[in-house]
Image (cartoon, helix red, strand yellow):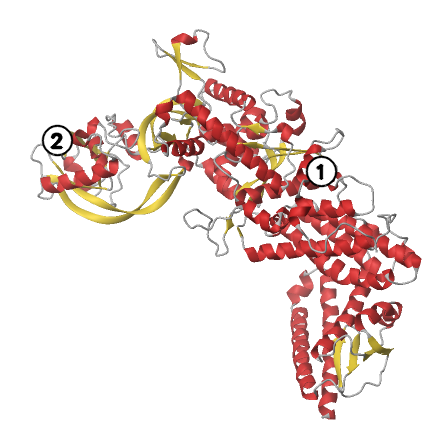
Amino acid sequence: MREIEMPGKYDPTAVEAGRYDKWLQDKRFAPSENKKARPYSIVIPPPNVTGKLHLGHAWDTTLQDIIIRQKRMQGFDTVWIPGMDHAGIATQAKVEQRLAEQNISRYDLGREKFVDQVWDWKNEYASTIKSQWGKLGLSLDYDRERFTLDDGLSAAVKKVFVKLYEKDLIYRGEYIINWDPKARTALSDIEVIYKDIEGAFYHVKYPFTDGTTLNGKDYIEIATTRPETMFGDVAVAVNPKDERYQDIIGKTIKVPLVEREIPVIADEYVEMEFGTGMVKITPAHDPNDFEVGNRHNLERINTMNEDGSMNARAGKYDGMDRDVARKAIVKDLNVAGWMIEVEPYTHSVGHSERTGVPVEARLSTQWFVKMKPLAEQALAMQKTDDRVDFYPPRFENTFTSWMENIHDWVISRQLWWGHQIPAWYHKETGEIYVGETAPADVENWEQETDVLDTWFSSGLWPFSTMGWPDTEAPDFKRYFPTNTLVTGYDIIFFWVARMMFQSKEFTGRRPFQNVLIHGLIRDEQGRKMSKSLGNGIDPMDVIEKYGADALRWFLANGSTPGLDVRFSYTKMDAAWNFINKIWNASRYVIMNLDDDTDVKLPNVEERTLADKWILSRLNQTIATVSQNFDKFEFGEAGRSLYNFIWNDFADWYIEMTKETLNGSDVQAKQNVQQVLAYVLDQTLRLLHPIMPFVTEEIWLTMPHEGESLTNAAFPVFNAELTDAKAESDFKRLVDLITAVRNIRTEANAPMSTMIDVMVQTDDSELMQIIDENSDYINRFVKPKQLIVNVDVNAPKLAMTKVITGAEVIVPLAELINLDDEIVRLETEVKKFQGEVKRAQGKLKNEKFVNSAPEKVVLAEREKLADWEHKFATTNERLIELKAAK
């Protein structure tokens, strides 16, 4: 055996140490120099610079790395562009939280110094994220790294804003928007998360001003969940078709506590069947009321400040926090006699996705994108050859539904961290100027202080990272549109949809050909990982214990497009054990190779049955893995690899080579070495996209030329290696060996105990298989003597197993209990009888026989014949034993 530097146990820390830096040093992840190669590009979904990567990031990026590594090995000119997102609200909130711990607010620092603080944060966490990418082994081209606030992307953002403004697709207006009172900024609809909370319906009297009565009462009853907004009431509305209230339309009533008069109006917005059929209209605090107010030209009264406290329009409650004000108002309504009833009520309340506080519907002047024309354009694109294909396809419905029901997008944010809107207001005239550069007489203008929604810049990511708006930029010309985007189903409308309509609008093309949608990583109980549950898993902790390859294997092997995956340490143990199996099998192979062993196959005529079988199984595995990779079915590819490596290669073929490797036939030994080297080489190539570190380590230990697996050719299907007969013959050999092994186990007869083995068969092919592979049978069965004949003189006290075409008989008179053997055979007979009945039932089904492919029906008939033979043979043996007793 050769002396090699491979310990007897897989140590991921030792294997992975320094490997990533070596890849970077050697420029292994750079695009191909062969520009005749087909391009293949991926842009990383840019993680927010708000903290460390979580397990979901690890899953997302591992899938991308599998794709790009395989394509690189297949000879594509690949590029995988890394980058990060400035994440406006989220990052600013983090920095403000850090400053608050020092009793400092952003207002204490001022905009410029505060932004400097955020840049420091960005640099700190960007460094951490890049370190984590390295730990995961991501084959990113760092020479092309981007950031959503870098100069190039800022230029793209300004270009897009100006172009949309010039096409009247961006406008500025006063509308009801979602407002985060903690971050003090506007939010888009999809940045609002709805939660059920315990609240109440407050039933309040609104008295008539002129002595009018309704049902004998001088007031009307209004129910509200937000009494603190009543100071913004400008009307009470009823449905014009509601006969109950025809006489009071046009009358006036007073708002309690402030004595302000407001009219009763008629509007079809009001649902007659809900509650009393009367609703108060507060245009500055409710989007539906806003629309009613527009229709009736009603005043808009904003009663709250930016931080959610009440303002001067709330009278004596001015300055109170909204929740404190509510309690005070309810108390005063009770004291004044205006409160009728407080009815407990559970209702859905919008909360800020970023800060977690309840969102206010607030009247505000904001910048908006008109979405309907852009959405229609993107939907039309999906009906052309330039469509984006979703994996799984059902997620296209999520995209379509959102785009068909889309609202205008509020893009301005009252933040300091982000792309400052390229709009200026003239100090004297109020004129608005929008441009990519400041006005020439900038001293007479003030720039808009708001910044753009983070998704505005990340929506340009696939093409802005390629050099756009310079349409002659080399990367843009060669690598755009990109090929595949990998992302979670939770941001289809946040990000995927925006990239699609922005790309179509500004490049005329789709942003990517495929979008692979994965689910969420949950804990072992199926719960979403969160800080509140304390069930989050740091991927770096997992890597420290098990290694990156084990984590990647788990993430790939548990991957079914669109579905969630549950993390468990039991699965991680299994992943490590599998790699350890690969390690030990590889170590055995490499130790048994000569220094000059070629990774090429011996001539066909020199290959044994086992050689032909393992090469055929390898070839089938190559086909299966390649097909599943193309469909992004990495879990299925992993299962195929696992079965081949563990069962076929390690448990059977390697074991069968030991006799030859330890024998005296030099040529036979060289042949086996070549097959072992070839199969290991091809297997490592297949595995490399999923587990790059350990495969590189093993591959470089093999006696062959080659600097790195990263650029080695990915295996391809070779029809010449497929050998159905070899697979069939080998299976029959394995069935025989397994049958004897099972008999030994059941009879408690270890391999050290010599036994006779009789095979009764009239199958000439099986006889030939046994004759030509007696060495394997001797190694795995250890028979005292092997008798193969049409008719064998079997003793009555023996154990038997029926295999296809034969009965295996092991005389074990001194080792078995006759009664136990009868019970065992009765169980076998029952099983075979059930299989016969099942197959007969299937073949009696005319629909199956007439509609199924002919080869499927033929295969079922062959199965029936096999089961009938096994049943008859086993039943005959059972009758003999019962008679002997």
- Which residue is labeled 1 in the image? 72
Label ID, residue 259: 2
Q: Amino acid at mark 1?
A: Arg
Provide residue 378's location: percent of width, then percent of height: 53, 32
Provide residue 766's location: percent of width, then percent of height: 84, 71
Q: Residues within 10 Å of mark 2 (few under 14, many from 20)?
A: few
Q: Residue furthest top?
A: 441
Q: Residue at x 29, y 27 (%)?
A: 294
**Label 2 element class:** loop
Q: Is residue 401 above or below residue 536?
A: above
Q: Quadrant of the C terminus?
A: bottom right
Q: CA distance from mark 2 to mark 1?
A: 75 Å
**Who is closer to the viewer here, 39 or 6?**
6
Contact, mark 2 vs mark 1 (Cβ under 8 Å): no
**Who is closer to the viewer here, 368 or 865?**
368
Q: Is residue 206 left or right of residue 376?
A: left
Provide residue 765's location: percent of width, then percent of height: 86, 69
Q: Is residue 31 visible?
A: yes
Q: Amino acid at mark 2?
A: Glu
**Who is closer to the viewer here, 222 or 555?**
555
Of badges 2 and 1, the one in the foreground is 1
Q: Residues within 10 Å of mark 1 (few under 14, many from 20)?
A: many
Provide residue 878's location: percent of width, then percent of height: 72, 85
Q: Is residue 719 above or below residue 320?
A: below
Label ID, residue 120: none
**Label 1 element class:** helix
Q: Is residue 690 visible?
A: no
How many dots with numbers? 2
Q: Is residue 752 left or right of residue 580?
A: right
